[in-house]
């Protein structure tokens, strides 16, 4: 089986790389958009690809700009830094459809209303993109992905496209949070990592980075030719229903959501603070753990904000409460002779968080509601550090 698959793949590559024969009059090119699949982080946004079908030449290929390799060295680091390389892949149409059907995704095929000349130009552009020196590109989630690439290629091929802006503008954060609405931890992570540029309103054209919006935009779009005449961008639409997917198991994250854990931590912090007040104990170990975790998380945010090339990670106002300087506080907590410096640290942190809470609604960035109890826990322990009369050891 592997041998035949390899031979088939080599046949596809050979035909694409050396394709010189024009498409026949029976050929057509379609946009394929797949509905989101909830079981994987990278599939909750949906997917888009281009199909080239020429029955006379027995060609039926799908050009997919969403190929990446988890096994590459330093993949997580490069992804966090914004240096992830994706590539254009080609698959047999039937294999592509079966894969997405089995995972539970409905595929919408929108056949493009192209002239023979436009169709040939688009085919040649795809073949050119698939050459080894061209198929790899630097991925960007918002501005250069599996959905924006086909749209840009089609626009370049046919000239002017009027999309009629089918959707009102929304912020990038609102758009992706809608996609991750069934995955609270993914939403929490995105809200934490992405800064204020994510709250900018996306233009209707920029919203097409999500396949669902791309499909809807194409359904209403018109091509304007050089004579000013208009025709629909899509001539026909077909829907390929998904197979019945397995019922997803209930994830523990559905119960231990960020907001529930946040308020549980805040309640625990209150209990420890009050108990420490009556017992005259500092509970220094709790502070070391709490501020240590906050400092490590702050290091991740600091890296994303100042070293990542992602366009929407700076400025990130979450650094006002979650920053690497909490690790400095941990060091001061561990040194008995540095208690005066620890007091100063608590005072600065207490004032900074008070100002943050006061200006929470006025900052140009939308915060996840789970941030409130987490930041409040840090504030409460700093308040205890300021107002207790003396330090005690456990």
Image (cartoon, rainbow, N blue to C red):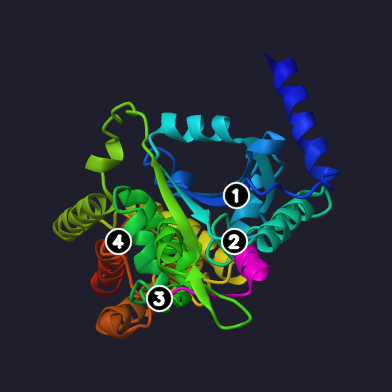
**Residue behind mark 1:** 28
Residue where numbered disc 3 is placed: 165
Residue span colored magenta: 152-164
Per the image, the residue denoted by label 4 is: 374
Task: Return the x and y of residue 214 as percentages of the image width and height.
Answer: 46, 61
**Is the C-beta separation of discs 2 and 1 under 8 Å?**
yes
Give the mark toward the camera: 1 or 4: 1
Alpha carbon distance from label 4 to label 3: 40 Å
Q: CA distance from mark 2 to mark 1?
A: 8 Å
Separation (CA) of disc 2 from disc 4: 55 Å
Tell me the mark number nearer the camera, choosing from 2 and 4.
Answer: 2
Instruction: Look at the image and tell me whether residue 329 can be seen.
Output: no
Q: Is residue 56 left or right of residue 132?
A: left
- Residue 257 in percent (x, y) is at 26, 48
Q: CA distance from mark 3 to mark 1?
A: 26 Å
Which of the marked residues, 4 or 3, is nearer the chain's N terminus? 3
Q: Nearer the viewer, mark 4 or mark 3?
A: 3
The residue carrying mark 2 is 114
């Amino acid at each position: 089986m592997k041998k035949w698959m390899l031979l088939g793949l080599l046949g596809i590559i050979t035909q694409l790389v050396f394709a010189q024969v024009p498409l026949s009059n029976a050929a057509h090119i379609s946009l394929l958009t797949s509905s989101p699949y909830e079981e994987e982080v990278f599939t909750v946004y949906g997917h888009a690809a281009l199909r080239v079908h020429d029955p006379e030449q027995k060609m039926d290929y799908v050009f997919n700009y969403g190929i990446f390799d988890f096994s590459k060295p330093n993949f997580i680091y490069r992804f966090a830094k914004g240096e992830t390389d994706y590539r254009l892949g080609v698959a047999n149409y039937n294999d592509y459809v079966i894969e997405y059907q089995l995972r539970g995704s409905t595929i919408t095929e929108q056949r493009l209303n192209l002239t023979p000349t436009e169709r040939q130009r688009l085919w040649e552009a795809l073949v050119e993109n698939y050459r080894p020196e061209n198929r790899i590109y630097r991925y960007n989630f918002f501005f250069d992905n599996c959905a924006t690439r086909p749209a840009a290629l089609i626009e370049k091929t046919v000239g002017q496209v009027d999309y009629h802006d089918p959707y009102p503008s929304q912020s990038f954060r609102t758009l992706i949070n809608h996609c991750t609405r069934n995955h609270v931890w993914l939403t929490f992570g995105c809200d934490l990592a992405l800064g204020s540029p994510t709250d900018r309103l996306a233009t209707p054209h920029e919203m097409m980075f999500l396949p669902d919006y791309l499909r809807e935009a194409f359904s209403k779009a018109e091509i304007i030719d050089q004579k000013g005449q208009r025709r629909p961008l899509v001539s026909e639409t077909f829907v390929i229903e998904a197979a019945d997917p397995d019922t997803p198991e209930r994830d523990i994250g559905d119960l231990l959501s960020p907001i529930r854990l946040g308020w549980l931590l805040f309640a625990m912090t209150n209990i420890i603070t009050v108990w420490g007040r009556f017992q005259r104990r500092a509970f220094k170990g709790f502070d070391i753990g709490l501020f240590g975790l906050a400092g490590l998380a702050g290091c991740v945010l600091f890296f994303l904000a100042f070293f990542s090339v992602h366009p929407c990670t700076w400025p990130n106002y979450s650094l006002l409460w979650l920053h690497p300087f909490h690790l400095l506080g941990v060091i001061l907590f561990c040194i008995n002779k540095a208690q005066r410096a620890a007091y100063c640290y608590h005072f600065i942190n207490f004032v900074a968080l008070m100002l943050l809470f006061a200006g929470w609604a006025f900052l140009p960035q939308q915060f996840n509601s789970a941030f409130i109890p987490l930041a409040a826990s840090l504030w409460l322990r700093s308040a205890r550090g300021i107002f207790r009369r003396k330090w005690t050891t456990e």
